[in-house]
């Protein structure tokens, strides 16, 4: 394998990793606020379908992507209503969201299967930096949404660790009663966090359908939402550390896609066995993290998946 | 809310949730200009309208009853086994492993098929259990990832070495007759009886045995369990093994009962089991009732297909009912006297 092939594989890995990164960043904010949203797989499905439908309907991919974000946020609103206000079990509510998103997208998307979206999101090399050897073509000859994922990592980091609302959000995930005492509204923080996370999941779904595969297929998210959830744990709930995990998984997906082309050892392994790779990798990563976390207190928010009841403060 | 007697609240909330879910689904129908009444009529006729329709619904209820019981036993101990789907698929694989590769006399064959399927389901559940108790890995994610691995594993077999020679579809050859579950009625098999017996046995065990008590204690608080000298590790592993075994039966039923060959199982029964269990409050007997309800919905979906209405409508209907029931039952539980509001234990 020569250098050019490797560089182009790494570049496609970055693109494949970006939806994971976007969804995981959103979920990270949600979990830091104390809510566990297991439903992102379903939200990503709805986002992916909405993006295709709205792009075909309006003729503009920008509108398509914005609609996907709004659709995600609406599902987030529903999830927040269930978990924050009604205080339903986060695990069950999350699974119900997956079923809901799956059912809704397959029902509504029946007529859109395998229709190509003509308007795609094109690569936009950034002048100067895209000329840097190796790194340039890998990171800076991508589409706008990939750049957005880099920016969002920085934004989420800055928000969580350098602003007062970010501090309040992290505190809502650790000790909500303390946040309440200082006068911040725990419910509002969690609602906003969940809607942000769901919007990011919608965006991630849109990335897959209009910017990556350029069409809609039933169940096309294929477990990426669940992988994003594992990434959050892998990163120890820290936005910067998400980058490594996301790109590792992006590379795994590309390795599977290219395995037949690469030949050699890869040719001998059945594609189905190759496809197990990201999931097995996620389990191994979690196991390695688990060992470390057992020695040192893990980074999980203290109040994760616990409903906040004001009267019990 | 307070004036409604306690015994009426949960069933009342459930019925109300179902009605709201159906109402929401009819809104979807109106939105896509589909005939509302005819759709419900088709579901009713196809799923409960006649004995043969009801029997078909019960066939769908069989695997869900087992995945539901599998979830119930794990969730009672607050062990979040989301891997019922994968354990079910591995159960089907285990059944196929014996049925397609050995030849045994009739009674032994069926026992070996069942035993191997159950063992494969249990082993698949043991992995996340071991990872949880010894390495501190979150079982929600590990059991879930294993679902995908199990499905891909069976795919690799039925698209590869186990595919029926000369067959164009990803199915294995038919199992020999002695590896098929004995049937009762035209479509039903003995799993419906097995599910009932297992549910009753679990009810009794959970309520009256020391083992059931240990599960309850571990489910409420790991700390209390430690004070009572109950090993959280042992209970966690035990419930996961049992849970995987039960999910495995759901897989055996589908390949050795309904289909008679190994194939890539229809996805979703494992996840539905979790929701069914939650709707039933993790009560084994209520799990049976709920699984019949879901069997009816699924059979209603196939009936829609025949009536040329998009069958995925039923999936929206299922999800809508679950969402409303989630809200309704949570609220109904919230307004009950506060007895068991144990803090969620995240270990």
Image: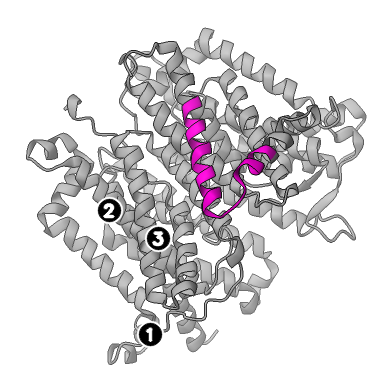
Instruction: Tell me which corner region of the image, top left, top right, bottom left or bottom right, holds residue A205.
Output: bottom left
According to the image, label 3 marks what residue? A202
Q: Which comes sooner in the sequence, label 2 or label 3?
A: 2
Q: What span is colored magenta in the figure?
A: B15-41
In this rendering, which labeled residue sits more in front, label 2 or label 3? 3
Circle 1 Cα neighbour tier, 10 Å, few/some/many (<14 / 14–19 / ≥20): many
Q: Which residue is mark 2?
A: A29
Q: Residue at x 70, y 55 (%)?
A: B155
Task: Locate residue A142 relative to residue B118 in the image: left or right.
Answer: left
Position of the N terminus of chain B, as image quadrant, is: top left
In the image, residue B21 above or below residue B167: above
Specify which label sits upstream in the sequence, 1 or 2: 2
* Residue neighbourhood size for the residue with mark 2, other residues' Cα within 10 Å, grouped as few (<14), some (14–19), many (≥20): many
Residue that label 1 marks: A141
Q: Is residue A66 left or right of residue A225?
A: left
Establish whether labels 3 and 1 are both on one chain: yes
Q: Residue at x 27, y 53 (%)?
A: A29
Same chain? Circles 2 and 3: yes
**Contact (CB < 8 A) between labels 3 and 1?**
no
Q: Is residue A234 above or below residue B65?
A: below
């Amino acid at each position: 394998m020569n250098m050019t092939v490797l560089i182009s594989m790494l570049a496609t890995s970055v693109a494949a990793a970006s939806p994971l990164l976007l969804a995981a960043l959103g979920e990270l904010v949600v979990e830091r606020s104390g809510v566990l949203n297991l439903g992102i797989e379903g939200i990503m499905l709805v986002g992916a379908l909405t993006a295709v439908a709205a792009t075909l309907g309006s003729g503009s991919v920008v509108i398509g992507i914005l609609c996907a974000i709004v659709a995600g946020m609406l599902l987030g609103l529903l999830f927040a209503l269930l978990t924050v206000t009604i205080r339903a079990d986060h695990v069950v509510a999350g699974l119900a969201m997956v079923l809901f998103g799956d059912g809704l997208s397959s029902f509504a998307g029946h007529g859109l299967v395998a229709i190509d979206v003509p308007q795609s999101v094109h690569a936009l090399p950034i002048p100067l930096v895209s000329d840097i050897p190796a790194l340039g073509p890998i990171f800076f000859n991508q589409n706008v949404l990939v750049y957005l994922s880099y920016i969002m990592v920085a934004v989420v980091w800055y928000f969580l660790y350098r602003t007062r609302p970010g501090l309040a959000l992290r505190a809502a995930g650790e000790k909500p009663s303390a946040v309440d005492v200082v006068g911040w509204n725990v419910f509002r923080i969690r609602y906003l966090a969940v809607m942000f996370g769901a919007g990011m999941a919608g965006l991630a779904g849109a990335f897959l359908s209009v910017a990556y595969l350029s069409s809609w297929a039933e169940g096309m998210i294929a477990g990426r939402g669940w992988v994003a959830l594992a990434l959050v744990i892998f990163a120890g709930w820290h936005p910067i550390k998400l980058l490594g995990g996301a790109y590792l998984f992006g590379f795994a997906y590309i390795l599977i896609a290219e395995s037949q082309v690469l030949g050699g050892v890869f040719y001998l392994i059945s594609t189905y066995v190759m496809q197990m790779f990201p999931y097995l990798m996620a389990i191994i990563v979690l196991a390695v993290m688990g060992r470390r976390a057992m020695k040192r207190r893990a980074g999980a928010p203290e109040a994760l998946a616990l409903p906040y009841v004001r009267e019990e403060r | 809310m307070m004036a409604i007697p306690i015994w009426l609240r949960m069933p009342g909330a459930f019925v109300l949730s179902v009605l709201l879910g159906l109402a929401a689904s009819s809104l979807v129908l109106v939105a896509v200009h589909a005939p509302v009444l005819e759709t419900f009529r088709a579901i009713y006729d196809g799923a409960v309208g006649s004995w043969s329709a009801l029997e078909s619904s019960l066939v769908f209820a069989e695997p869900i009853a087992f995945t539901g019981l599998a979830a119930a036993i794990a969730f009672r101990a607050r062990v979040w086994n989301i891997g019922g789907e994968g354990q079910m698929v591995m159960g089907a694989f285990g059944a196929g492993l014996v049925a397609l590769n050995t030849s045994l006399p009739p009674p032994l064959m069926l026992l070996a098929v069942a035993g191997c399927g159950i063992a494969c389901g249990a082993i698949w559940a043991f992995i996340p259990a071991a990872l949880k108790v010894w390495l501190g890995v979150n079982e929600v994610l590990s059991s879930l990832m294993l679902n995908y691995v199990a499905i891909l594993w069976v795919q690799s077999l039925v698209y590869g070495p186990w595919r029926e020679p000369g067959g164009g579809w990803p199915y294995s050859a038919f199992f020999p007759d002695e590896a098929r579950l004995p049937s009762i009625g035209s479509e039903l098999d003995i799993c419906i009886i097995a599910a009932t017996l297992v549910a009753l046995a679990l009810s009794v065990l959970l309520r009256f045995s020391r083992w059931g008590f240990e599960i309850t204690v571990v489910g409420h608080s790991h700390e209390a369990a430690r004070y009572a000298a109950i090993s959280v590790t042992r209970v966690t592993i035990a419930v996961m093994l049992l849970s995987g075994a039960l999910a495995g039966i759901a897989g055996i039923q589908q390949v050795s009962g309904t289909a008679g060959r190994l194939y890539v199982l229809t996805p979703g029964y494992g996840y539905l089991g979790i929701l069914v269990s939650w709707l039933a409050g993790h009560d084994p007997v209520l799990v049976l009732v709920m699984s019949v309800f879901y069997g009816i919905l699924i059979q209603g979906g196939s009936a829609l297909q025949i009536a040329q209405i998009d069958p995925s409508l039923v999936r929206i209907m299922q999800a809508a009912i679950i969402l409303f029931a989630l809200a309704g039952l949570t609220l109904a539980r919230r307004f009950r006297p506060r007895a068991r509001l144990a803090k969620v234990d995240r270990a």
